[in-house]
């Protein structure tokens, strides 16, 4: 339910770079990955206000760089 909500809210656009999803899945839906803004391992909640839909590049970037500005930009 939370994943589906995040994808609908993003409307096919990465919530970090604001670009359209890089490709569509076989069913035609835009491919975005849902990310927990505050990681569950760090006591983040599994709620709609703690998730964002990201393109694969931004998803990897946010995990590798862990930049506070990116986290701030994703906070709703």
Image (cartoon, rainbow, N blue to C red):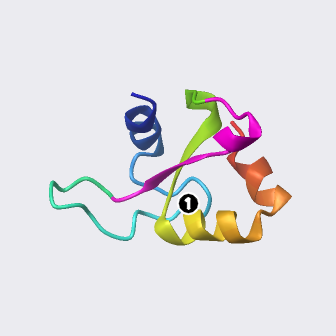
Q: Residue at x 57, y 53 (%)?
A: 15
| Residue 23, horizontal then vertical, whole percent | 31, 69
Q: Residue furthest right?
A: 68
Q: Specify few, some or many for label 1: CA neighbours under 10 Å numbering under 14, 14-19, or 20 or more.
A: few
Judge from the rendering whether residue 33 lies leftward or rightward of residue 63; answer left or right.
left
Number of disc labels: 1
Q: Is residue 38 visible?
A: no
Q: Residue furthest front?
A: 41
40 in magenta: yes
- Which range is magenta? 31-45
| Residue 61, horizontal then vertical, whole percent | 64, 70
Q: Residue at x 77, y 63 (%)?
A: 66
Judge from the rendering whether residue 42 lies leftward or rightward of residue 31; answer left or right.
right
Q: Quadrant of the N terminus?
A: top left
Judge from the rendering whether residue 46 lies leftward or rightward of residue 69; answer left or right.
left
Residue behind mark 1: 18
Task: Write down the quadrant of residue 32 in the picture.
Answer: bottom left
* Of the pair 32 and 12, the residue shown nearer to us: 32
User: Is label 1 in a helix, a strand or a loop?
Assistant: loop
| Residue 6, horizontal then vertical, whole percent | 47, 38
Q: Residue at x 16, y 61 (%)?
A: 26
Give the answer, above or below, for where 10 lies relative to 33: above
Q: Is residue 66 visible?
A: yes
30 in magenta: no
Q: Quadrant of the C terminus?
A: top right
| Residue 41, horizontal then vertical, whole percent | 69, 42
């Amino acid at each position: 339910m939370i994943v589906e909500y995040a994808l609908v809210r993003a409307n096919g656009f990465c919530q970090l770079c604001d670009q359209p999803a890089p490709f569509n899945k076989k069913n035609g839906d835009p491919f975005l990955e849902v990310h927990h803004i505050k990681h569950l391992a760090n006591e983040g909640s599994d709620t709609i206000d703690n998730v964002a839909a990201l393109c694969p590049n931004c998803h990897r970037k946010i995990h590798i760089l862990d930049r506070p500005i990116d986290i701030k930009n994703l906070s709703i």
